[in-house]
Image: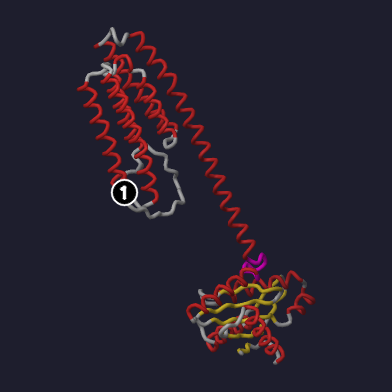
Amino acid sequence: MDSLPPSSPLKPTHRSGWAAWLLPQDAKRRLRTEQTAVAGLFSIASIGFLQYAGWAGYASQLAVQLWSLVTLGGSAGFFLAIRSGWSERFKDPSLTIAQMVYAISACAMAYMHTGPVRGALVTLLMVVMMFGMFALSTRRVLAVGLFALAVFALAMTVSAYRQPQVAPAAVEWGHFIMLALAMPAVAVLAERLKRLRRRLQDQKRELRQALDEIHQMATHDSLTGLVNRRCLDELLKKEIRRSARSGARLCLALIDLDHFKRINDQHGHACGDEVLRAFARDVGQKVRITDALGRWGGEEFVLLMPDVDLPRARAGAERLRRELEQLAIVHGTTTIHVTLSAGVVELQDGETAEALVNRADQALYEAKSRGRNTVLAR
């Protein structure tokens, strides 16, 4: 009897000793097993109550021992079925309804053999129903509640018939009426819990979406959708550290769109924005999946190229230059052709991120001084 949420972002944990033997590594199965174990501990406490009833003379020792064996056997069986994963073949791998039906039946059996203290079994029944409130729909809680009423009605009838002096019919009618009043209340609480859980899940999903949006805004340029300068700084420093550890090569290209100010002046900033978006959308798709293209600022872009030498990095930047040169960017009734200039450098031993970018900037300046629409590697 557990209440495993429909989607739980649990991560596997590694245990040792007896905990590793009792609890599986799979996160969802472990949670089911833990909750079934809690229900088993409650069953053991119930057995203690029955043992007390037998010791006090309210129940026969034979009935107490038989009930204890049945309860322990059922608890152990459910624990092993869930611990082993056998229960996962069913729609409800927690076996919630099966566990509740078994526990209710066991409570009804005990009710018929505990004489004057049998009223305590009604309290035990309510605890069993509480387990289901966290896991079942309102309709199923009602169905299980009707089953409990039917089983206890039978147990009360048998008790009143067999032991009228110990279990007077009037008293049994009182017990049944209280049960009949309590079951709808349990169903109402189950519905309220279901709504609360759904609301919490919705809030959790909305919070996750908001965090994703915040992360997107913090790491990506809103106009082009490329990673922004802040993110590029982090990626560059990370790749430099990786290069220092492993000796892997790292190249960087600083790219500038030629005569971009002229585009803004002649066609307006909206057209300039479309040029930037087109570069990111159409040309940016040509970079390797391991590369990182981001907007450095204005019309400048940075292309990080890990695990390549300088000639291959220059060839990659040259491919982008050709793609952009052949691209026709349409904005309204205007068709624009744009070129780029790029400075490509390779990380040197002990070089900092700032020094690497400065060398790329110098190479870019030289490329532009040679007439633009040029890729220069240094």
Find residue 287 and report its horizontal and vertical position in percent: 55, 77
Quadrant hosting residue 163: top left
> Between 55 and 132, which is closer to the camera in this rendering?
55
- Asked which colour scheme the image uses, the reply is secondary structure
- Asked whether, in this view, residue 1 is left or right of residue 359, the answer is left
Q: Check if residue 62 falls in the magenta segment.
A: no
Find residue 191 and report its horizontal and vertical position in percent: 49, 32
In the rendered image of this protein, does residue 143 appear above or below residue 25?
Answer: above
Find residue 339 and report its horizontal and vertical position in percent: 67, 83
Find residue 217 and report its horizontal and vertical position in percent: 64, 61
Quadrant hosting residue 366: bottom right
What SS does tag 1 mark? Answer: helix
Name the kind of residue labelled 1 in the image: Trp
Residue at x-position 34% and y-position 48%: 19
Q: Magenta residues?
A: 220-229
Q: Could you classify mark 1 by the number of other residues whose Cα lies within 10 Å: few (under 14), some (14-19), or many (20 or more)?
A: few
In the rendered image of this protein, does residue 305 appear above or below residue 142?
Answer: below
In the rendered image of this protein, does residue 283 appear above or below residue 139?
Answer: below
Reading the image, the residue beneath label 1 is 18
Residue 22 visible to an observer of this rendering: yes
Query: What is the residue that sits farthest to the left in this orientation?
Result: 62
The rendered magenta stretch, by its main secondary structure, is classed as: loop
Q: Check if residue 224 falls in the magenta segment.
A: yes
- Asked whether, in this view, residue 244 is left or right of residue 145, the answer is right
Quadrant where the C terminus is found in the figure: bottom right
> Between 261 and 6, which is closer to the camera in this rendering?
6
Residue at x-position 29% and y-position 48%: 84
Quadrant hosting residue 3: top left
